[in-house]
Image (spheres, grey):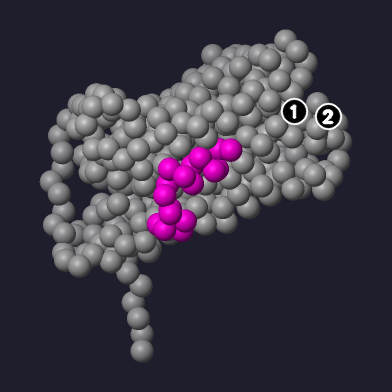
Amino acid sequence: MRTDVHRAWWVAAVTALVVVAAGACATTAGLLVTPMHREFAWSHGTIGIAVSVNMVLYGLTAPFSAALVDRFGIRRTAAGALSLIAAGAAITTAVSAPWQLIAGWGVLVGIGCGGLATTFAATVAHRWFAARRGLVTGALTAATVVGQFAFLPVMSWVIDRFAWRSATVALALIALAATPLAWSVFRDHPADLGLRPYGAAAFEPKPQPEPGAARRTLRVLLGSARTGPFWLLAGTFAICGASTNGIMWTHFASAAHDHGMPTTIAASVLAIIGVVNVAGTVASGWLTDRFSPRLLLAAYYGLRGTSLLFLPSLLAPTVQPGMLAFAVLFGLLDVATVPPTIALCREIFGVDGAIVFGWVSTAHQLGAGLVALGGGVARDLMGSYDAVWISAAALCAMGALLAAAIRKKTAAQPA
């Protein structure tokens, strides 16, 4: 007997492809640092400014993306974000001054990627799934990771073979190719097709578009910022960004190159982290459906900090067993923090949980941006990233303590 696949799974699949296209931009920036430094003689700190702007705007866009989806729909939001990514990547190919890199990669790509951040994925999962939300959220987060890491060896090879501009052209083409697919498959709500969300017991009418998306987003921020759980979640996620996007995804290739490791090999190590990330993130989504998200977060941050503490001693011209063990452990923990963080936002802040998670994601990107800039400056001043790795490990220990302190409260309760 033939069994039809619920449309929600097709929407989730295309969402995964779209966030893969957006995610490819996140780690490619780390591969551009060394060739741009050589070609333009720009300092690591100067290049880090563009990366920092990218990450900060990514984070600032994310909460407004959730509200814009409520106002304009999934299709328009996705198509607009992909168009910005394509334009920014194309502009980056023609840069000759730092401000141009900031405008193209920092501003346009940053805003475009922010529009398709995990907040977007969380909104899709919330609209289309009543059951399996944790699993779907973990899978879509894993798709982001696939985009961030699966392209690394290919982009590294392209940069070595054809120079760095070819890699940014490829990113622009990937975003352009994903745009018509998203437009043709996405629907803004199951009710558009006369369907119930997957696992829902009853039909849910499509909510009316909400005017004042920006005002609603700011109103949610003001309300949630009056509670202690918001600041604990924001603090832990800022540390998450600092210890992943900020240092690992931006500076690992450059740090490994300082120790004599070829960039292509360093990119392969990051790709291993990305492959393991898929399993780690999906498993974290499964665990989030069954165990305390707060305790899961505390464990994740503690283990991540321990792994970063040992990383400086593992960097070498070749990949040794210790580096492989680090890649596997870090991969399991890297994006595993996302499903429990989303779950806590939903449990504590209810229907505003997706927008609250967007603001928490802003803290993630602010932490990432500060360390992306600070890591480059530290490398310029000290000639090494060792102090940055150790500082990131200390931050993760603090993140474990903050996560353990999170308690369930309603948004109306005072901190």
Category of crowding for the residue at label 1, using alpha-carbon neighbours closer than 10 angstroms: few (below 14), some (14–19), many (at least 20)? many
Residue occupied by mark 2 = 259
- Residue 5 in which image quadrant: bottom left
Q: Is residue 10 above or below residue 386?
A: below
Residue 124 at x, y percent in the picture? 33, 51
Residue 121 at x, y percent in the picture? 38, 47
Quarter placement of the C terminus? top left
Q: Residue at x 83, y 29 (%)?
A: 259
Residues in magenta? 286-302
The secondary structure type at the circle numbered 1 is helix
Kindly identify the amino acid type of the residue bearing the numbered disc 2: His
Front position in the image: 93 or 73: 73
Contact? badges 1 and 2 (CB < 8 Å): yes
Q: Residue at x 80, y 32 (%)?
A: 313
Q: CA distance from mark 1 to mark 2?
A: 7 Å
Residue 407 at x, y percent in the picture? 35, 38
The secondary structure type at the circle numbered 2 is loop
Q: Residue at x 64, y 43 (%)?
A: 330
Front position in the image: 396 or 163: 396
Count of number-bearing discs: 2
Residue 414 at x, y percent in the picture? 23, 27
Residue occupied by mark 1 = 255
Q: Is residue 113 magenta?
A: no
Front position in the image: 141 or 338: 338
- Residue 381 in which image quadrant: top right
Residue 14 seen by the camera: no
Give the residue at the far top of this rendering: 381
Kindly identify the amino acid type of the residue bearing the numbered disc 1: Ala
Q: Is most of the magenta stretch helix, strand or loop? A: helix
Residue 360 seen by the camera: yes
